Structures are given as C-alpha cells and as structure tokens.
Amino acid sequence: MGSQIRCVQCGTYNLPEVTKCRVCGHPVHKDEGDLRKCPECGYEHNPASSEKCIGCGRDFRATKAAVAEIQGSKPAECEHWSEMPAHTSRTAKVGIAGILILLSGALGITHGLLALLPETGSEILSHYEAIIPPGEVLDELLNDSELLSAAILVFGVLAIVMSMFTFTRNRFSGALAGAVFGVLSVGFMIGAFFAIVGLILVATSKREFIPECD
C-alpha cells in the first residue's frame, strides 16, 4: 500500500492516478502541498482548490479578496531621505507660516474686541483708519453689527488654535484652515495680509506634513 494514497475523509486507499476517492468521492491529494489549512478552525486537509473549509465552512474566497485588497492598496505616502534639501526649506517656510497665522489671529482678536468696545477702542481705531483708509469702511460695518465683530473675534481665536497644526506638522488641512480663519479675522487688514502669506507658504509645503519613509 506504500504506493497508494489514503483518503483523508474515509481512510480508503486509492491508486496514485485517481483524483477522487473510490468510496466517498473526496478529492485525493498526492502531497501536503495540495492541501490548505483553515485559519479559522485549523483543519489541515482542505483541497488547495476548495472554496470552503470542510471542517467549519469558512469561505476561502473572502480571505483571498481581503489579501488582494491589502496587497493592491496604495502605500502610505512618505517623505524620502533624498528630499532632505527641500525638506529643510519647507520646514522654514512652514515655521514662518505658523508665526504669521498666529499673528493674524492675535490681530483679529484685538480688532474684534476694539469693535465690540467702542468706548475703549474708538481712538485706536481712528488712528488705524487714518493709516489704512479702507479700514474706515470696515469699521463702520463692525460698528453697525456686533455679530460681525463677534465673528471676527471667533475667527481670530480659531486662527490661533489651528496655527498649532503648522508647528506640529500633523494635519495639512488644519493648517490651511487656520490660515483661512486668519484671513477672515481681518486683523486691521494687516492680519489678513499675514494670513494670506501664511496660506501660500503652507499650500506650497504640503509634503512637510507627511511622515518620513522608514
């Protein structure tokens, strides 16, 4: 019987040339390489071509699909060591952008507070209007609407909070949003200018926000 193949299902010995057991019809395999072990129940005698485990009924097709999906998925983007010269430049740009966005938020908060407290800020705003003529039109709008003044104040706070993303470099979208809030906070127009410059610096340094390759 040494040349015969034993059926793993019923134990019957079959001739080497057969592919199915002569008693139970179970597929007959010549070596262990033709068998598949089930990762679910550990059954080791599943035919390699089978779609389900004989022991527990696990669907091998689902496993294949999952593996294919993992293997075909796009690898995480990372910064290669060869980019080091550009990396140094981007680091400086993002650092400057963070400072500018932070300043724009601080100026926006100051502008919003002065607009909400006309008794305290009217003199300061009058000097600002003399230096930057368009500011007079904006201040008239702020004086007419406390809601708009409060919005500028809130935008300034958001700009400061989200400027942290530029310093930590862990969320590109957050850094962009911080710059946008800096623009919306106005900040005596100067803050808006700072934020626009910061926005450009962040937008052109996107790869600074991805991890280094292993």
Image (cartoon, helix red, strand yellow):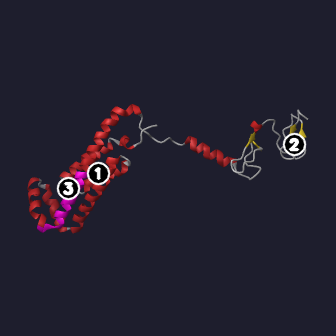
Dot 3 or dot 2, earlier in sequence: 2
Question: What secondary structure is marked by label 1?
Answer: helix
Mark 2, residues whose alpha carbon is within 10 Å: few (<14), some, or many (≥20)? Answer: many
In the picture, measured across the screen, residue 196 lies left or right of residue 39, that is left
Tell me: residue 162, above or below residue 87.
Answer: below
Mark 2 = which residue? Answer: 21
* Residue under the image location 11 percent in, 55 percent down: 133
User: Given the image, on which type of amino acid does mark 1 rest?
Assistant: Ala
Please name the residue that numbered disc 1 is placed on. Answer: 179
Compared to residue 156, the image places residue 42 above or below, namely above
Residue 103 x, y percent position in the rendering: 22, 52
Q: Disc 3 designates what residue?
A: 107
Residue closest to the eye, 120 or 127 = 120
- The amino acid on which the numbered mark 3 sits, given as a three-letter code, is Leu
Q: Is residue 188 left or right of residue 212?
A: left
Residue 135, image x, y percentages = 14, 57
Q: Nearer the viewer, residue 182 or 9?
A: 9
Q: Is residue 116 magenta?
A: yes
Q: Is residue 112 above or below residue 44?
A: below
Instruction: Give the magenta-colored segment's residue range.
Output: 102-119
Q: CA distance from mark 1 to mark 2?
A: 73 Å
